[in-house]
Image: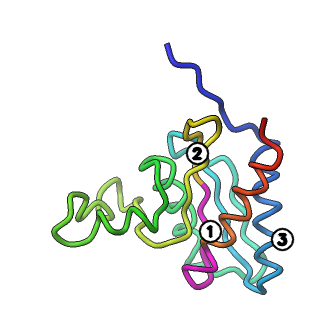
Amino acid sequence: MKMVPKLGLADVRVMVAAAEREAKRIGVDMDIAVCDDGGNLLMFVRMDEARVSSIQIAIDKAFTAACARRSTRDYAASAAPGQPAFGIHASHQGRFAIFPGGLPISVGGHVVGGIGCSSGHPDQDEAVAWAGLNALAAVAP
């Protein structure tokens, strides 16, 4: 039997608060989603001016990072035409995202979830997601 850590609500709140602060700092309201290790949504925040069209994208980025166990930026290369995961973005009811801004959440060497951010440029989305991860790393045992 495998014993793995799980994200708690307090952990998710730390991540989302840090992601919101980073989004405010760079001046881009974001859609921010956090999923557990099975891709199930734990928390979603839509900042006031975040794009409505980015709601599902943020959720899908978190899902992809959690389930693929890697960043959506890295996953995009294997999902390109001719690569092993080509077409994955059309499976699972279109839930796999292949744009930067989704990062796996790892604790003690175990992927425990994913964070996804969307509404800005892909590099901004990823920077906001990193802020959430770094905040968790600062408080995780």
Q: Residue under circle 2?
A: 113
Q: Is residue 62 magenta?
A: no
> Looking at the image, which residue is at 21% across and 58% down?
84
Q: Residues within 10 Å of mark 3 (few under 14, many from 20)?
A: some
Alpha-carbon span between mark 2 and mark 1: 14 Å
> CB under 8 Å between callouts 1 and 3?
no
Alpha-carbon span between mark 2 and mark 3: 21 Å
As displayed, is residue 28 above or below residue 1? below
* Residue farthest to the left, as pictured: 82
Q: Is residue 117 magenta?
A: yes
Q: Residue under circle 3?
A: 21
> Looking at the image, which residue is at 78% across and 73% down?
22
- Disc 3 marks a residue whose amino acid type is Arg
Q: Magenta part of the protein: which range?
A: 115-125
As displayed, is residue 119 above or below residue 46? below
- Disc 1 marks a residue whose amino acid type is Cys
Q: Earlier in the sequence, mark 2 or mark 3?
A: 3
Q: Secondary structure at mark 3?
A: helix
> Looking at the image, which residue is at 58% across and 52% down?
114
Q: Earlier in the sequence, mark 1 or mark 3?
A: 3
What label does residue 117 carry, if any? 1
> Looking at the image, which residue is at 60% across and 44% down?
106
The colour style of the image is rainbow
The quadrant in which residue 117 appears is bottom right
Q: Is residue 4 left or right of residue 30?
A: left
Residue 105 position within the rendered picture, expressed as x and y whole percent measured from the top left? 61, 48
> CB under 8 Å between callouts 2 and 3?
no
